[in-house]
Image: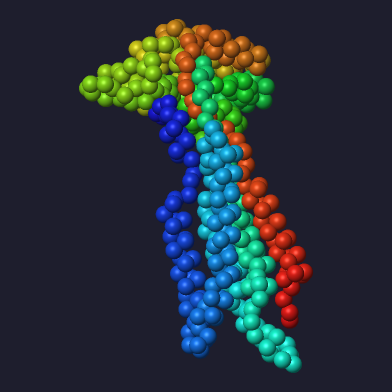
Amino acid sequence: MNDTPPIDPAAFASSATHLDPFYAILSIVVAVVFIAILLGIEAAATPREKRWSTVLRAAAPWLMVVVGLTALTLWFRHYVNDAARGEELAIKHPHAFWLWPSAMLVGWIAFTLQRHRAAAVGFSQTAFVRSRGVGAWLSDLPAVLRVLAMFMLVAAFMRPETFRTVKKEEDSVDIMIVFDMSKSMEEADMPRDRMDAAQRVIRRFLHRTTHDRVGLVIFGQQAMLQCPLTEDSRLLEDIVRDLNIGDVPALGTAIGDGLALALAQLRRADGTCDPTADSPTCGPDLLCGSDGYCKTEKKNKVVILLSDGDSNMRLRFDPDEAANAARAMGVKVYTVLVGRESNDWLGFGGGVNPETLRSIALGTGGEFFRATDYESFDRGFQTVRNQLDKQKRVTYERIAGKALYIPFGIAAAILIGLGLLLSHTALRRLP
């Protein structure tokens, strides 16, 4: 798996989720057309001599919505710019923007449908109600506040927030674990069986691994990449825990193919390049090899091979060929013998072959370990880690900053409360 090259902070920040301005402008156009249609319907249903006054009365609440929304937008823009000073702004749920028609729906119900309710009040003299005072023009204000509150809720649902990009330099090595999952790993010459013993200690090792990149190859009759190189040790720990005999064909042990597949992953770990180019594109401290792969002069790559050593299957590579390839790449292979070499009380052996694993380790400059218990596994893994060269890896991490959606929710609650207060007091509408 190719490693991702260092990310420029500005480019990383620009990859955050933002709202496309095109859709915002399109929404404004749709809202204007919607309001114009409503006003046109009002005008068409009104006698000509009263048409302009009717249209003006129908447009008044929408104008108040525009004025109020403009004021809130300017205020919150100032708030967001001040709060996000020195940090990047992102919208966590941009699709919530498409809830804005709900605010238009509230306005249509309040400004159009409720206006045409059938109701009447008797007056002895119509001269008292012939002219519209200031209170009459402001009678739609509670509904206007509800519409503005809906827009504020939509803004809150979009979850605007800030983040900052932190550059980290950490010591790292690349480790490929090659795990034998042949049928012989079911032997019970270790607590429970060989498979369970190996799983438990590898998970313990991964639990302590923080900055290294670790991958997993499993093999039996054939080899399979179970997990490419990753810094997510918790994910790999879960993968190891869920391994079962039978995940690959188990009637055979192809040690050479498993080791060769792990070496292929390490070869690709630092990315690819074009060796014929004038300036090959590899990361810092990396060279472009003649084979088209980026590589480093540091010995920061290693294979840990866990097996009972009884290699009896070959598809493409035998153990010696894979060991020669590892030596040519400068990759040390540390082998761990899983199982006991001694015979049981009936005289049957445990089916292990330490010579194969010892030959691979010595031929690549690694070490051979016998793992007869958990402590042996732990000591072997710690020895491997301490003997490796470290490489500085630059990573960029996005750290959450301020949650800017809370004031939008508070503003919506204030607008709804103020609207209810006005509709039951000074701007109460009768009937």
Viewer-closest of 34 and 183: 34
Tally of numbered tags? 0
Residue 359 location (% of width, % of height): 44, 9
Rendered position, 326 above or below 315: above
Quarter occupied by residue 188? top right
Q: Is residue 10 left or right of residue 161?
A: left
Residue 74 higher or lower than 376, as above or below: below
Relative height, residue 17 to residue 327 (above, below): below
Q: Where residue 148 sits in the image (x, y, percent)?
A: 61, 61
Q: Nearer the viewer, residue 175 or 92?
A: 92
Residue 429 at x, y = what percent? 72, 76
Q: Quadrant of the N terminus?
A: top left
Q: Is residue 324 left or right of residue 351?
A: left
What residue is drawn where x is 64% and y is 20%?
A: 190
Residue 110 percent location from the top left of the image: 63, 73
Determine the residue positioned at 52% across, 37% down: 88
User: What residue appears at the point 46 percent right and 15 percent down from the top-left corner?
Assistant: 391
